[in-house]
Amino acid sequence: MKQNIVHIALVVDDYDKAIEFYTQKLHFTLIEDTVLSETKRWVLVAPKGSTGCCLLLAKAANEEQQSRVGNQTGGRVFLFLNTDNFKRDYQNLQYHGIKIVREPVVEKWGTVAVFEDLYGNLWDLIEPFAK
């Protein structure tokens, strides 16, 4: 048996603002942007070089969904972004004025910092140590 998680839905308030943040500030690749209806689009973004899971940017469609924008996990770190160059990517976060919630620390498994996306979702930026 083989299974994969291919998309994770991230509730956003505006497709274009979200696309701009992820592609211009985090340098993700826009994989797809397909109009499905007057109010709905199928928008996928992924880190450059990623061959796995994509983020599905899903615009909040009602008040309940809107209330979850930026806090889909009750304030816990939601997404984990591995990198091959922590210094480069951390400096990129700083350059773009992205809020750093927890400064870099070196753990026994790698280097990690916590940042917020444009909605306040918490992300870990991680450079794992080579095994």
Image (spheres, rainbow, N blue to C red):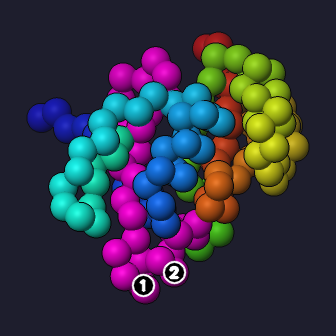
Give the class, few, some or many, for how many residues have Cα within 10 Å of label 2's Cα (few <14, many ≥20).
few
Residue 54 lies left or right of residue 95; in this view the side is left
Label 1 residue SS: helix
User: Split into 4 quadrants, where in the image is the N terminus?
Assistant: top left
The residue under label 1 is 64
Of the pair 100 and 61, the residue shown nearer to us = 61
Of the pair 112 and 59, the residue shown nearer to us = 59
The residue under label 2 is 67
**Amino acid marked by disc 2:** Ser
Most distant residue in the left direction: 1
Label 2 residue SS: helix
- The magenta stretch is 45-73
Q: Which mark is residue 76?
A: none
Most distant residue in the bottom direction: 63
Q: Is residue 97 above or below residue 23?
A: below
Which residue is at 18% across, 55% downward?
36
Of the pair 18 and 104, the residue shown nearer to us = 18
- Hey, which quadrant is residue 22 in on the image? top right
**Amino acid marked by disc 1:** Glu
Of the pair 98 and 53, the residue shown nearer to us = 98
- Give how far across and how far down residue 31 sits, in percent: 34, 32
- Hey, which quadrant is residue 87 in on the image? top right
- Give how far across and how far down residue 28 sits, in percent: 52, 31
- Give how far across and how far down residue 21 sits, in percent: 59, 44
Which residue is at 23% across, 51% downward?
35
Q: Please check the rendered image and state whether residue 74 is part of the magenta-colored stretch, yes or no.
A: no
